[in-house]
Amino acid sequence: MLPTSQIIEYILSFLFAFAIAFVISPKILDMLKKLKLGQEIRQDGPQSHLSKAGTPTMGGIVFIIAIVISSLVLNRNNIFDVLVFLAYLLLFAIIGFTDDYVKIVNKRNLGLTEKQKLLVQLVFAIILSYISLVKSSYNTDLVVPFTSFKLHTGFLYIPLTSLVIIATTNSVNLTDGLDGLASSVTSIVMLAFAIIAINLNYITTAMISLSVAGACLGFLRINAHPAKSFMGDTGSMALGGAVSAISIAMNMHLIIIIIGIIYVIESLSVIIQVYSFKHYGKRVFKMSPFHHHMELSGYKEVQVVKIFCIITCIASIIGIISTAFI
């Protein structure tokens, strides 16, 4: 049984971040409008999305602010862990911000080139992997789902962790394509990680996870359909960094595949689509990422978001169960 004081801290972490994001959302929205930071819509995307052109982007600043404030204020006794987490969040937010800025300045849907993004991501991922290794006292044993077995990675820890960071951040980025999709799915993912962290007594990790979940839900004030603002790559890359940081903090690199199944599906749909068209000249999906395939198959945006959230809830329960053997 958790102490009452600890329960209060967990609830406060969620509510504080939620309140900050909810309150500042309209103010940030007004600022984005004044700065004329409108989103450019990809011309080869669903035609129904063309009407969204000009919608303020970079709205992810809302939950980034909420997460930073909440994490620093409520976890002052474990500031090193907080700073490591914020390094993940903010470094990838910088990549996303740069990408968004290039798009806006050039008035096109293409920002940084894939090579530019990947190179910076790789550098940041290696640095963060090393910091996480030091933080964990050089513990390279990864949790294997549904077993008490730990996978000893040794010198492969940094390459594997770097791969997880890059794959996760890009997958969350791909998931951000419908109103409220990435923020809704990620809030559920972070709640699942919070439950796991609480069960395993990772107090700071649990509190930060709850802060991220609360901030994402607060952001829905301006991001839910019909979205008044998009989170942009600034937000989606930051969330990818946050999800990576939490899973890596508990050495649960593998479990993120279960809980973050929507991220996996979105990424695989793009990989399969590109490979199939390049080698066979045929498209497996009507459009990728997979959420666009769902749209073109007749599902409305809100329906797709609901379905993906339900899938994430089920996957999260399975992921939580998978850690019961630790």
Image (cartoon, helix red, strand yellow):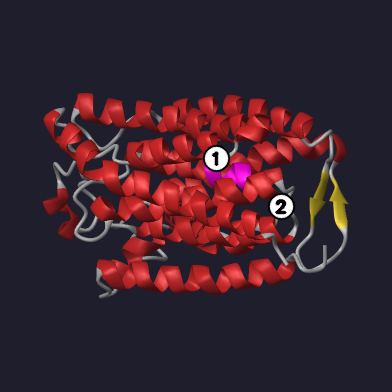
Q: Where is residue 292 in the image (x, y as percent from the top left)?
A: 32, 62
Amino acid type, label 1: Leu
Q: Single out the mark in the foreground, 2 or 1.
A: 1
Residue carrying label 1: 74
- Horizontal relation, residue 158 to residue 20: left or right: right
Left or right, 216 with reference to 317: left
**Callouts 2 and 1 close, C-beta under 8 Å:** no
- The location of residue 233, given as percent across then percent down, is 37, 39
Name the mark on residue 54: none
At 70% from the left and 71% from the top, the residue drawn is 321
In the picture, measured across the screen, residue 138 lies left or right of residue 185, that is: right
- In this view, the residue in front, 275 or 144, is 144
**Looking at the picture, does residue 297 appear above or below residue 271?**
below
Q: Position of residue 293 (x, y in %)?
A: 34, 66
Total of numbered circles in the picture? Answer: 2
Q: What's the mark number on residue 252?
A: 2
Could you tell me if residue 181 is visible in this image? yes
Measure how far apart labels 2 and 1 are at the Cα level. Answer: 24 Å
Q: Who is closer to the viewer here, 86 or 16?
A: 16
Q: In this view, does 39 lie above or below 265?
A: above
Q: What residue type is labelled 2?
A: Met
Q: Give the range drawn in magenta.
A: 242-246
Count residues near mark 2 (Cα–Cα under 10 Å), then give few for <14, some for 14-19, many for 20+. some
Q: Is residue 275 magenta?
A: no
Q: Which of 126 and 320 is in front in this view?
A: 320
Q: Residues within 10 Å of mark 1 (few under 14, many from 20)?
A: many
Quadrant containing the C terminus is bottom right
Please tell me which residue is depicted at 46% across the width and 40% down the height of the picture.
67
Q: What's the residue at 68%, 55% (across, down)?
A: 197
Is residue 142 placed above or below 299 in the rendered structure?
A: above
Secondary structure mostly taken by the magenta-highlighted segment of the chain: helix
